[in-house]
Image: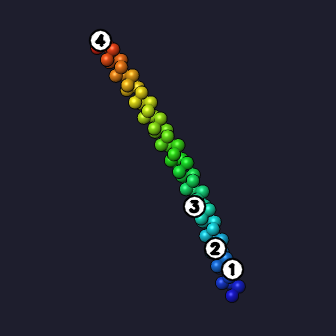
Amino acid sequence: MDLIVAVISLMIGLGFFALIAAVLCSVAFFHHVKSYFLTIKKANLFQTKIESLRERRRSFSLI
């Protein structure tokens, strides 16, 4: 009977540990994905500004 209680207690403890580890890993993953996509968004915004400035320069040179 003691062995059954010990195994059930161990399973509950390891399950709780796995739940905490999964939550922490998910938070870290989403944090890095967010920063990655913000970096891409900034790069795209910068590229868009450069292209608009080039278009302005072309339009002024045609005048």
- Measured as percent of width and height from the top left, residue 49 is found at 42, 27
Q: Which amino acid does the dot numbered 2 rest on? A: Ile
Q: From the viewer's perspective, is residue 20 above or below residue 58?
A: below
- Measured as percent of width and height from the top left, residue 60 is found at 33, 14
Q: Comparing marks 2 and 1, which lies closer to the viewer?
A: 2
Q: Comparing marks 4 and 3, which lies closer to the viewer?
A: 4
What residue is shown with label 1? 6
Of callouts 2 and 3, the N-terminal one = 2
Category of crowding for the residue at label 3, using alpha-carbon neighbours closer than 10 angstroms: few (below 14), some (14–19), many (at least 20): few
Q: Secondary structure at mark 3?
A: helix
Q: Which amino acid does the dot numbered 3 rest on? A: Ala
What residue is shown with label 3? 22
Q: CA distance from mark 1 to mark 3?
A: 24 Å
The residue located at (44%, 30%) in the rendering is: 46
What residue is shown with label 4? 63
- Quick check: marks 2 and 1 in contact, CB under 8 Å? no
Q: CA distance from mark 2 to mark 4?
A: 77 Å
Q: Which amino acid does the dot numbered 4 rest on? A: Ile
Of callouts 1 and 3, the N-terminal one = 1
Q: Secondary structure at mark 2?
A: helix
Disc assigned to residue 12: 2
Category of crowding for the residue at label 4, using alpha-carbon neighbours closer than 10 angstroms: few (below 14), some (14–19), many (at least 20): few
The residue located at (62%, 75%) in the rendering is: 11
Of callouts 4 and 1, the N-terminal one = 1
